[in-house]
Image: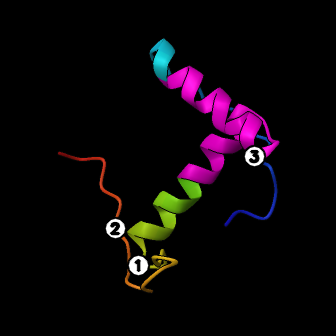
């Protein structure tokens, strides 16, 4: 996981449903929308380096956005 909230901006165009989902998750976590995206990217990075484990069974999780 990154050590800070970050300083460098990135942008992405998403549909309204995705934006609303991110906003709801940000509200639930008490953070900004950008922080939710940063946390998701941290999990993706951990997955790609076999460092993301299932909290239930301990198996390594692999996230792959490529179909």
Q: How far, Cα to Cα, is label 2 from label 1?
A: 7 Å
Secondary structure type for disc 3: helix
Residue 41: image tag: none
Residue 62: image tag: 2
Q: How far, Cα to Cα, is label 2 from label 3?
A: 23 Å
Q: Is residue 44 left or right of residue 4?
A: left
- Do the numbered discs 2 and 1 sit on residues whose CB atoms are within 8 Å? yes
Q: Nearer the viewer, mark 3 or mark 1?
A: 3
What is the tally of numbered marks visible in this picture?
A: 3
Please give the range of residues in magenta: 18-40
Residue 29: image tag: 3
Secondary structure type for disc 1: loop
Question: Where's the N terminus, which quadrant?
Answer: bottom right
**Of residues 58 and 37, which is closer to you in this image?**
58
Q: Residue at x 71, y 62 (%)?
A: 2
Secondary structure, magenta segment, majority class: helix
């Amino acid at each position: 996981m990154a050590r800070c909230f970050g300083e460098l901006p990135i942008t992405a165009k998403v549909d309204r449903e995705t934006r609303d989902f991110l906003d709801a998750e940000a509200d639930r976590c008490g953070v900004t929308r950008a922080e939710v995206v940063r946390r998701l990217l941290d999990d993706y990075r951990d997955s790609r380096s076999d460092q993301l484990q299932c909290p239930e069974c301990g198996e390594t999780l692999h996230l792959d956005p490529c179909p």
